[in-house]
Image (cartoon, rainbow, N blue to C red):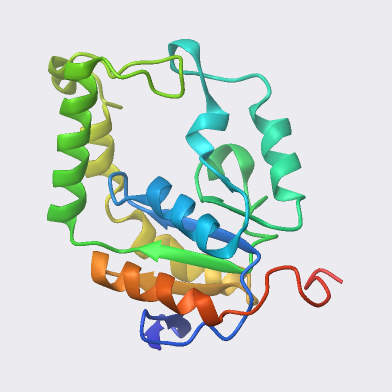
Amino acid sequence: MRGCYLVTVYSAADPVDWAPRRVLVTGVTGSGKSTLVQRIGDRLGVPSTEMDALHWGAGWQERPEFRAEAAALAARPAWVTELQYTSKLGALFLERADTLVWLDLPPRVSLTRLTVRTVRRRRRRERLWGVNVEPPLWTIATDRDHIIRWWWRTRKNAAKRVPAYAVAHPRLRVVQLGSRREVDAWLEGLEGAGTVGAGPSPDK
């Protein structure tokens, strides 16, 4: 385990000695959150949800149903999703989660992944969540919220916020993963994490 501002943080080498039922994944844009959400869900046999798919409607606008659907998701007994939109949802998911996986990859890795993904999506005009496409690449110079500029502004947020989340929610187990190898190792460790849904809910 690692120490993080007096907060215990699990690593890939630590056994998963609890049964994850409600899992959040956090990390900078481009770190692979959505992919890991799906992999954790598949490993645990728990429904996984991509938060961006709930949030974005046509024209990059928030879907009217987003907040109600997010609240319904958080209320379920088991789920895996990204920790996103806290400015809109507050601590809704943190209050229910038992596990927070922090994808703490080197900045060059997440930025490279994000850049390659953004260019590929734009060139192929890929439909994102069925309704949107990436804007023209030149908008990186004009749009303050372009995804690449967003990465630069928010790249250090998780390191600042994760310890605070752990302090505010003491039962939350925080797992810090710094490479693809650590991600794979931690996922392998989920095999011995117990049966999801066994025993009483920690809310009771």
Q: Quadrant of the N terminus?
A: bottom left
Outermost residue toward the top in this view:
59
Q: Residue at x 35, y 64 (%)?
A: 159
Q: Is residue 14 above or below residue 73?
A: below
Outermost residue toward the right in this view:
204
Q: Position of residue 97 (x, y in %)?
A: 64, 62
Q: Residue at x 78, y 73 (%)?
A: 202
Q: Quadrant of the C terminus?
A: bottom right
Residue 113 placement, left or right of 20:
left
Q: For residue 102, which quarter of the picture?
A: bottom left
Q: Position of residue 183 (x, y in %)?
A: 33, 67
Residue 50 placement, left or right of 124:
right
Viewer-side residue, 162 vs 29: 29
Q: For residue 177, which quarter of the picture?
A: bottom left
Viewer-side residue, 148 vs 17: 17
Q: Is residue 76 above or below residue 5?
A: above
Q: Is residue 62 above or below residue 192?
A: above
Q: Residue at x 28, y 36 (%)?
A: 150
The reply to whether residue 27 is visible in this rendering is: yes
Q: Position of residue 88 (x, y in %)?
A: 59, 37
Viewer-side residue, 117 vs 198: 198
The reply to whether residue 142 is visible in this rendering is: no
Q: Position of residue 59 (x, y in %)?
A: 44, 11
Q: Is residue 58 above or below residue 80?
A: above
Give the total of numbered labels.
0
Q: For residue 69, which quarter of the picture?
A: top right
Q: Residue at x 67, y 38 (%)?
A: 70
Residue 202 placement, left or right of 128:
right
